[in-house]
Amino acid sequence: MNTKKTHFMARNSSPNRFLALALSPIAFALSSTIAAREEPEAADTQPAARWDQIAFVVKSWGETITQWQYTPEYGGVWIEVERKEDTGDRRVWTKAYHVIDADPARYAELAALVRSLPDPAPDAADCTDFMADAPYGTIRLTRGATTTEIAWNAGCMDSDYKQFIETLRAADRLVSGWGKESPVARTVDTLIP
């Protein structure tokens, strides 16, 4: 049995093949580095995206009112939620999905707004002037396998927090405007108990 294995390896591979396989990652790294140095940089290229996806949700009384997500490569979707009918003990909500095409200029505008958010973001739990029952939600910033989720609550009336909320509203108005320009791609009815 041992001779068959040796014979198989001798027939299908050689020491040079093993050496080539062992050195291939080094060769790839070197060729990539050389190619990167040789490629001229285009003058009108957009800066690299800081996030792979930006997502935003607005809720009120536990129900999603609107949400969107946008990526630099694939565009995104804006979802508006409307109460359709009341069927006694259950409500029907309709989600209307508007597809937003990818656009590097749009992404750059959205990313600039999001980059202007304070880091770290203020916490509504630390608010001294708070009004209950205001809209709330999250903004999610995803890069690779890491997602940063920032909760917000429009009920916080502290001056620094109001500026934070105004920046979020500006981002929401921007993407909502793009969504409203796009036709509805599909609708989904949801029963809410």
Image (cartoon, helix red, strand yellow):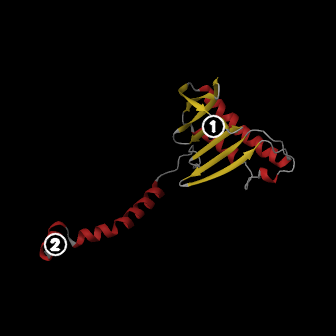
Q: Please say if 58 is above or below 149.
A: above
Direction from residue 181 to residue 41 in the image, left or right: left
Q: Is residue 91 visible?
A: yes
Residue 91 position within the rendered picture, expressed as x and y whole percent measured from the top left: 63, 28
Q: Does residue 97 appear in this view?
A: no
Q: Residue at x 22, y 73 (%)?
A: 15
Q: Quadrant of the N terminus?
A: bottom left
Q: Which residue is mark 2?
A: 5
Residue 19 in which image quadrant: bottom left
Residues 103 and 70: in front is: 70
Taking 162 as reference, is 81 above or below it?
A: above
State the residue in front, 104 or 193: 193
User: Element type at marker 2?
Assistant: helix
Q: Point out the frontmost of discs 1 and 2.
A: 1
Task: Name the residue type under label 2.
Answer: Lys
Indicate which disc, 1 or 2, sits on the residue closer to the N terminus: 2
Please name whichever residue, 191 or 165, is drawn nearer the observer in this view of the structure.
Answer: 191
Q: Where is residue 49 drawn, in percent x and y?
A: 58, 48
In which quarter of the view is residue 105 placed? top right
Asked which secondary structure carries label 1, the reply is strand
Amino acid type, mark 1: Gln
Q: Quadrant of the C terminus?
A: top right
Along the horizontal axis of the image, is 167 left or right of 49? right
Check residue 67 in the rendering and tell me which mark sits there, or answer none.
1
Residue at 68 percent across and 50 percent down: it is 150
Mark pair 1, 2: CA separation: 60 Å
Q: Position of residue 83 (x, y in %)?
A: 65, 26
Which mark is on residue 79?
Answer: none
Seen at 26% across and 70% down, the residue is 18
Q: Residues within 10 Å of mark 2 (few under 14, many from 20)?
A: few
